[in-house]
Image: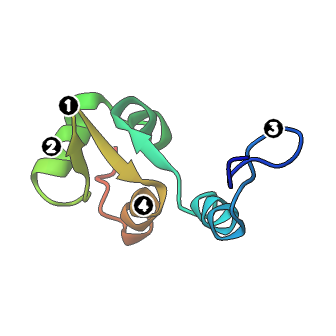
Amino acid sequence: MNVDDDKTGSPRIDRSRRNNLSAISTLPPVFNTSEACHYLRISRPTFLKLIATGKIRAQKLGKGWKVLDTELERFLLAGEASPQ
């Protein structure tokens, strides 16, 4: 019998791994470009300008940008958005 299988044949989950999975669920949500634009209620070009000027910190992953929701909240609370 394999060490990872119990008597029913289903794999057991290591307790330390289960704890790691719960830690992942506590991570802050990540927004893609369109989600961030919708959240901030701004256009995509404006969002990209804010990233280019360093007013919003984001990471380029693949073809798009990813930004933490905490970063968007920081941006809004800092009052860096221009009034319309």
Mark 2 vs 3, N-terminal side: 3
Mark 1 vs 4, N-terminal side: 1
Identify the secondary structure beneath mark 1. Answer: helix
The residue nearer to you, when weighing 64 against 14, is 14
Colouring rule applied to residues: rainbow
* Dot label at residue 45: 1
Residue 62, placed above or below residue 3: above
User: Cβ–Cβ below 8 Å for labels 1 and 2?
Assistant: yes
Q: What residue did someone put label 2 on?
A: 49
The residue nearer to you, when weighing 70 against 74, is 70
Give the alpha-carbon distance from disc 1 to disc 4, as whole Å: 18 Å
Q: What residue did someone put label 4 on?
A: 76
Give the alpha-carbon distance from disc 4 to disc 3, as whole Å: 52 Å
Q: In x, y percent, where is residue 62?
A: 21, 33
Mark 2 vs 4, N-terminal side: 2
User: Cβ–Cβ below 8 Å for labels 4 and 3?
Assistant: no
Point 15% across, 60% down: residue:
54
Give the alpha-carbon distance from disc 1 to disc 2, as whole Å: 6 Å
Q: In x, y percent, where is residue 53?
A: 10, 55
Mark 2: give few (<14), some (14-19) or many (20+) Cα within 10 Å: few
Point 35% across, 50% down: residue:
67
Q: What residue did someone put label 3 on?
A: 9
Mark 1: give few (<14), some (14-19) or many (20+) Cα within 10 Å: few
Point 36% across, 66% down: residue:
79
Would residue 43 be found to the left or right of residue 24 on screen?
Answer: left
Disc 2 residue type (three-letter): Lys
Mark 4 vs 3, N-terminal side: 3
Identify the secondary structure beneath mark 3. Answer: loop
Identify the secondary structure beneath mark 4. Answer: helix
